[in-house]
Amino acid sequence: MKDFFTEETGKIRELVSRDPSYSELSDEKLKARIEEMMDSRMKQAEMTDPEAASYYSSLSFRKKRSLADTVFESIRGLGILGKIIADKSITEVMINGYDCIFVERDGKLEQIEDKFESQEKLRNIITKFVQDMGRSVNESNPIVDTRLADGSRVNVVLEPIALNGPIVTIRRFPEEGMTIQKLINYGSITSEAAIFLEKLVRAKYNIFISGGTGSGKTTFLNALSNYIPKTERIITIEDSAELQIRNLPNLVRLETRNANSAGAGEISMRDLIKSSLRMRPERIVVGEVRGAEALDMLQAMNTGHDGSLSTGHANSAEDMLSRLETMVLSGAAGLPLEAIRQQIASAVDIIIHLARMRDSSRKTMEITEVAALENGKILLNPLFRFEEDEYTTLRKVSGILKRTENKMVHPDKFISSGIYDYLEEEKK
């Protein structure tokens, strides 16, 4: 089937570029020029190309606008990618080669009709925005993590690693900061749990947020950071900066750096965590713990940096503990398992587990306390658990995050922080 959209994009761009001064036009004048050439092409099609004329007559106003935007982006911006990014309703972009694009809107994936003109065009666009961010991507360095100017996280994988052409995944973040109140409105958490979490953050409990891919860990961490007192000095450490912590004046943001083409100059998460300890932080926020840096993070939590926050991939709160053990072992293979578990049990106070449900909603599944190390095993004390109710179906999840009957085993940080109202509630 003939792809008129791509074909007409090229023809209109060609008409625009016949005027050698087009590259000197402002964005507004270029858009006006594109509109003129689009009208010219439509009239030309009516006389010489019945199929194209039929295509134009079937276009809605929105489709015509989309065609004009695509021509503009192909001349001045990131092509179809620029148009997709400009759509504020899209939260994730998945490009699986030049002719297969999926986007996420309102938590649901859909394939869109747009596609790049060719594999080479897509590769050129990738090279452009990666270079704009101070990185490089090529056959010898085919995997790159970077971000766009608006803070969107970008992962690129090129051939020969990617068998079906260049792969681009973009995770976008809302322009407005996420808050716990918004999560309550979305049904991700209850007001009761939110009040409890606020007290935990103020009392400087060390908190890990666990969950699978797309469960909302970073979003939840951003929301939780609003409870950090503005008088404290916070240092964030990330592979690719995506945290949107706001309204904290004494905030230092650190980001890792890959090695250059000569294999030198790498700055790892471990390097940044060690360096951050010399910056007099009151809290350290690690965007996501993935490897050997877990040991450094745990040691920081155990050496006076209470109130630290981090996230990690796991299928449950218990699984998060196992993942932490594995990560620590990857950087300290000779360390006894008993010693690792002791480090985890004394460093991590609270684990918040999130999940993306079968109806694409994101829920807080569990808030649990790390209670103790007993007989070589870390014991958990669940404080809140999500329970589905009688209105839940196979397509729609209905339920609530309920407070368990368990009391906190370690209320000492509440006491030292002067947050006695929690203790009064526990006595009731």
Image: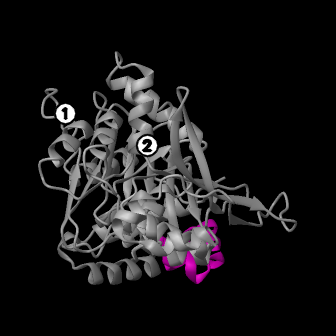
Q: Main secondary structure of the magenta part?
A: helix
Residue at (60% x, 69% y) in the render: 427
Around disc 1, counting alpha carbons within 10 Å, would you say few (fewer than 14), some (14 to 19), or many (20 or more)?
few
Per the image, label 1 sits on a secondary structure element best described as: loop
Which amino acid, by three-letter code, is at mark 2? Gln
Label 2 crowd bin: few (<14), some (14–19), many (20+), radius 10 Å: some
Residue wearing tag 1: 259
Between residue 159 and residue 228, name the one nearer to us.
228
Q: Is residue 86 above or below residue 274?
A: below
Q: Residue at x 60, y 74 (%)?
A: 192
**426 or 59, which lies in front?**
426
- Return the x and y of residue 276 as percentages of the image width and height: 18, 48
Q: Position of residue 350 (x, y in %)?
A: 48, 52
Farthest residue toward the front? 427
> Which residue is at a point 20% across and 43% down the rendered structure image?
272
Tell me which numbered mark, 1 or 2, is placed earlier along the sequence. Answer: 2
The image position of residue 280, as x and y in percent, is 14, 55
Q: Quadrant of the C terminus?
A: bottom right
Q: How many marks?
A: 2
Relative side of 53 to 245, left or right: right
Residue 23 image point, x, y percent = 21, 69
- In the picture as drawn, the residue positioned furthest to the top comes out as 334
Q: In this rendering, would 382 be left or right of 329?
A: right
Residue occupied by mark 2: 119
Residue 243 occupies quadrant? bottom left
Q: Nearer the viewer, mark 1 or mark 2?
A: 1
Magenta residues span 42-67
Mark number for residue 49?
none
Task: Name the residue rendered at 50%, 30% in the picture.
Answer: 163
